[in-house]
Image (tube, rainbow, N blue to C red):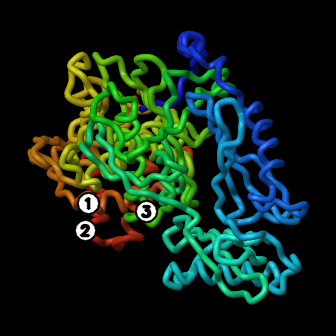
Amino acid sequence: MTSPRLAAAGTAAVTAVLLAAALSPTAGAADLPTRDTAIRNAVTALTDQAAYLGLTSAQGTKVRDVVIDKDGSQHVRYDRTYRQLPVLGGDFVIHLKPGGAYRSASRATTRPVSLSTISPSVSAPKAAGLAASALRSVNRGQALKNITSKPQLVVDALHGAPKLAWETNVVALDRAGNPVGRTVVTDARTGGQIDAWDSIETATGDGKSLYSGTVPLETTVSGSTNQLKDPTRGNTYTGDAANGTDLCIFGICIVRAPATLFTDADNHWGTGATADRSSAAVDAQYGTNETWDYYKKTFGRNGIKGNGAGSFNRVHYGNNYNNAFWDDSCFCMTYGDGDGNVFGPLVSLDVAGHEMTHGVTSSTANLAYSGESGGLNEATSDIFGTLVEFNAANSSDVGDYLIGEKIVKPGFGKPALRFMDQPSKDGNSANCWSTATGNLDVHYSSGVANHFAYLLAEGSGAKTVNGVSYNSPTCNGSTVAGIGRSKLGAIWYKALTTYMTSSTNYAGARTATLNAARDLYGANSAESAAVAAAWSAVSVG
């Protein structure tokens, strides 16, 4: 919720990890063969079983994996080449007894691997073009962008008699900016397609969050596990910071706490309880997804920078860390777990929308984080964090004009961090602009713009929205009629991305939003008049 603060590298967590590793049980490990021993045993078996495996002097082998069972049995997996070309379907596994003697072998193909020539009739560029056409076909002919094709000459032993083929990995972006990919195997003699499959494997899972109930998650399949990485949203992912901290000097972080990507076997993440570390990760990933979708659906913005690139999340940062922050230098969001008294884990939906919006602001107006422009920067994050929450329409975390209401604990003393209808209810924020506004902390000077935003959307006076009661006064005694959240978002986004600059102050924000309203609805529109009235109602005029 604030800008990153300088942090000293913590040693306690690192020490604990090292001690845990040192004390881990290793009984019996010394009795098992090592990887190198298993490979040496397999080499002997290769020599003895060459004829059975169909190995010839034109073929080569390379170890891909080694598995050693608890009883000492060994399984060495090989890939095969033919005249230095990879052989699709040439893989095999040597199975060895505990003492290293040959037991058996598993082969992908039992056919002899031999070709009369390895010179293709179809060129690499031709194969690349055929693969791109195949990708377009499965994407219903839509216009794809940034198509990249990488053909590789291979021997295909997967589909009948071995034959020379091109294996081409082709990737692109669809019209929505999402990555699409396909692997296409083409007969190198005829140009006919032998096989094809999606090369970007995704899966739809779900997660039990701390604050938003059970939510859908798009994940990435990796072998037998699922990664909390969303290929449909720029490969945004969430990792466990393991309670580590960054080492930062003069605002430059020279050592960052690493974040280990969350993985899961069944694609059902979290338990909804803090004891399960992946529950907070579910909230963070879900918040990222909803923020991404809000900006894309509402404004056509493809990611934080608008270039389709995903950010990443670090959860479980520090110890009892009562904060969350966006950092441009790593293009990432970081969440503390809170101390359990003042805050719980700071991974709620509106906090995610707030922090990611700092990245949007940095990529657009880049409002300086001090004085009145700093207040506008913070307010921008509060405004769009709120709109993200409303847009998500999540029954477990309904939209409201309270900031951080899910993360506060009784020890905080208030039901939320900030209150947009009447910012002064937090005890520090300004309802109305004055010449002293720019001297306030940016989290308190933001109150003027938050108050404006509420009045523009909902109007003044008493009102109940989604079961929450509000009563927003004006600073000039006027009555203001709201124009709705959708128009508030459109006007503020247009002003942020088109008219505001790094030094914009409150007077400049009034001008910027009036210009935006004029562009969107007309200079003499009801919307333009509402913008002017809402600013006057918070003493900016």
Given the image, on which type of amino acid does mark 1 rest? Ala
Q: Position of residue 246 (x, y in %)?
A: 59, 23
Q: Residue at x 55, y 37 (%)?
A: 327
Q: Which residue is mark 2?
A: 526
Given the image, on which type of amino acid does mark 2 rest? Ala
Pointer 2 local density, CA inside 10 Å: few below 14, some 14–19, many at least 20: few
1 or 3: tag closer to the N-terminus = 3
Is residue 156 positioned above or below 90 on the image? Answer: below
Q: Are marks 2 and 1 in contact (CB under 8 Å)?
A: yes
Q: Which residue is mark 1?
A: 530
Badge 2 marks a residue whose secondary structure is helix
- Comparing 389 with 79, the one in front is 79
Q: How many marks?
A: 3
Tell me if 414 is positioned left or right of 156 in this view: left
- Comparing 459 with 489, the one in front is 489
* Spatial CA span between label 1 and label 3: 26 Å
Badge 3 marks a residue whose secondary structure is helix
Tell me if 278 is positioned left or right of 135 in this view: left
- Comparing 133 with 98, the one in front is 98
Given the image, on which type of amino acid does mark 3 rest? Lys
Badge 1 marks a residue whose secondary structure is helix
* Spatial CA span between label 2 and label 3: 27 Å
**Mark number, residue 13:** none
* Spatial CA span between label 2 and label 1: 6 Å
Q: Nearer the viewer, mark 1 or mark 3?
A: 3
Q: Which residue is mark 3?
A: 296
Quarter residue 110 falls in: bottom right
Quarter residue 197 falls in: bottom right
Is residue 148 positioned above or below 1 on the image? Answer: below
- Comparing 192 with 212, the one in front is 192
